[in-house]
Amino acid sequence: MGKLRTGNKSDMVGCLEDLISLQESASHPTVKASSLMGLLFGPTFFYYAQKAFSSYILSQLEHVSRVDVVWDDYFPESPKAETRSKRGKGVHRRVEPSSVIPGNWPEFLRIEDKKAELFFFLATSMTALNTGKQIISTCNMHT
């Protein structure tokens, strides 16, 4: 059986830039949700969802009428599943509003099921935002 070659996504940027035409500006921002995982930490997942994540989304909506939130999606049968499984076991903690956020955040995020659970929790918390504007989300909780 063959071996999966690993690399950095940034290595492909140069190749891909020639294939697309760049837009000067977008009428609505697209937020890559996983890039927000390093924002303000709080004592609980509820606090994190309200004070860090939702606050950031609301700040984006001050200037536009729509925000697209894109979540990473992890499929267990994907070729990258092997690579992700080698990253370690991580910290086990239920993602619930009253649950305390683990002190070792990167270790917690190594567990793909926990990351998916966190993304789903954050996406659900966004639905409670009453903004009068559009928030489009790609989040999907696999069962």
Image (spheres, rainbow, N blue to C red):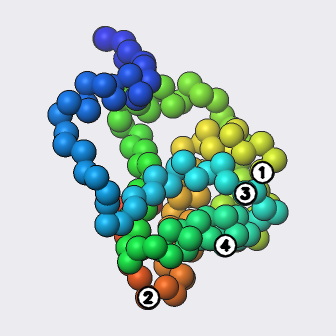
User: Tag 3: Cα neighbours inside 10 Å, few (<14), some, or many (≥20)?
Assistant: few
Q: Amino acid at mark 4?
A: Gln
* Sooner in the amino-acid sequence: mark 3 or mark 2: 3
Q: Relative to 75, is 114 on the left or the right?
A: right
The residue tagged 2 is 132
The residue tagged 4 is 50
Q: CA distance from mark 3 to mark 1?
A: 13 Å
* Sooner in the amino-acid sequence: mark 1 or mark 2: 1
Q: Nearer the viewer, residue 30 or 118?
A: 30
The residue tagged 3 is 40
* Sooner in the amino-acid sequence: mark 4 or mark 1: 4
Look at the numbered disc 1 and give the secondary structure of its residue.
loop
Q: Position of residue 90 (x, y in %)?
A: 69, 38
The residue tagged 1 is 102
* Sooner in the amino-acid sequence: mark 3 or mark 4: 3
The residue located at (55%, 74%) in the rendering is 58
Q: CA distance from mark 2 to mark 4?
A: 18 Å
Q: Nearer the viewer, mark 1 or mark 2?
A: 2
Residue 113 appears anywhere in the view: no
Q: CA distance from mark 3 to mark 4?
A: 11 Å
User: Tag 4: Cα neighbours inside 10 Å, few (<14), some, or many (≥20)?
Assistant: some
Look at the numbered disc 3 and give the secondary structure of its residue.
loop
Q: Amino acid at mark 3?
A: Leu
